[in-house]
Image (tube, grey):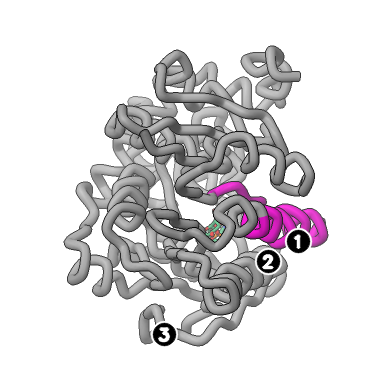
Amino acid sequence: MKKILITGGAGFIGSHVVRRFVKNYPNYQIFNLDALTYAGNLENIADIENESNYTFIKGDIVEADFINNLFHEHQFDGVIHLAAESHVDRSITDPLSFVKTNVIGTMNLLNAAKDSWNDNFDNKRFYHISTDEVYGSLGAEGLFTESTAYDPKSPYSASKAASDHFVRAYGETYGLPYVITNCSNNYGPNHFPEKLIPLFINNIIENKPLPVYGDGKYTRDWLFVEDHASAIDLVFHEGKNQETYNIGGFNEWQNIDLVKLLCQQMDKKLERNEGESEKLITFVKDRPGHDLRYAIDATKINKELGWKPSVTFEQGLEKTIDWFLSNKEWLQNVTSGENQNYYQKQYK
Ligand SMILES: Cc1cn([C@H]2C[C@H](O)[C@@H](COP(=O)(O)OP(=O)(O)O[C@H]3O[C@H](C)C(=O)[C@H](O)[C@H]3O)O2)c(=O)[nH]c1=O
């Protein structure tokens, strides 16, 4: 029996990872540690909450004593660390909360893992989930590789870059076995509707304006969240210690083109006239320090571990839209803030 701690498992990406591990590895005991902030929602994993190999723990990685006690009590074999403040716009207005969770929180986990493993690192692994934003912004050409120099621009990406550096520093200094993955933009079911795709799906349903920042010519590289979860599974089990793997779908879209595709698919699903949703597009003031382009070279994970995405962007987007349209209650709960006291009141 392996004991695995997954942090942030009530969040968007974390919930897909937790579900995958609980279902695929009945011989593991999965501990899901989540602070249930505004973006964490136990409804995301309601389907697995009664599984015998699953335990939910409400708690904040920023609390060092709590984290140390948790590691002492459970003696985890592995950590998959996803808990993070993740929204770039929020990091611009409240950078300190990003330092607290993403940097201090990661430090607390590193310290607790190092101390509980007590120099016996056999079959232990600390897996840090990170972002391609640590590499900064690309011009029109080129791709981020694992050896691209870090050049974070936003408070969010600076906090993730700092936490990546600390993970590597603990590897170098104390011999802590780690892996890091840096992934491109995710989308899919349970995505919190502050991010581009779920926000715009919600706004189209509600006939609200679609606020495209600047001229909309910013480029992101999109990956379906379940494909990210499959990559995490593979790296956790087969990745090499002290290595970094980039994860991405070679799937670049300029924001405005993506929004138009989304509008077309939504018109069909909602049986609206062609072009109706596009009328909601509104160009608004740009995000300060807006990174122009992210694009991932995912050759290493493909060649070394044989990972590749399972769906095309069109398929993934359709699955996502279908999920949101058949989970309107979920959307209503999170947009009204009800998730804070609705499903998870039992953990208050
Ligand atoms: C919310 C919003 C966004 N945008 C633009 C800004 C970006 O160029 C693009 C995507 O924005 P979003 O905030 O959804 O995601 P990123 O800023 O690219 O960052 C995301 O992907 C990386 C990898 C992470 O690591 C972040 O955690 C994750 O939030 O759409 C708009 O034009 N309008 C809007 O209302």
Res 290 visible: no
| Residue 248, numbered label | none
Is residue 146 shown in magenta? no
Residue 54: horizontal and vertical position, in percent? 46, 24
100 versus 276 height, above or below: below
User: Which comes sooner in the sequence, label 2 or label 3?
Assistant: 3
Q: Quadrant of the C terminus?
A: top right
Residue segment shown in magenta: 82-111
Q: Ligand 1 is found in which quarter of the picture?
A: bottom right
288 versus 73 height, above or below: below
Residue at position x 36%, y 52% in the image: 232
| Residue 159, numbered label | 2
Q: Are the residues tagged 3 and 1 within 8 Å (C-beta)? A: no
Q: Residues within 10 Å of mark 2 (few under 14, many from 20)?
A: many
Q: Are the residues tagged 1 and 2 within 8 Å (C-beta)? A: yes
Read off the residue under disc 3: 147
Residue 323: horizontal and vertical position, in percent? 38, 28
Does mark 3 have its CB less than 8 Å from ligand 1? Answer: no
- The residue type indicated by label 3 comes to Ser
- The residue type indicated by label 1 comes to Val
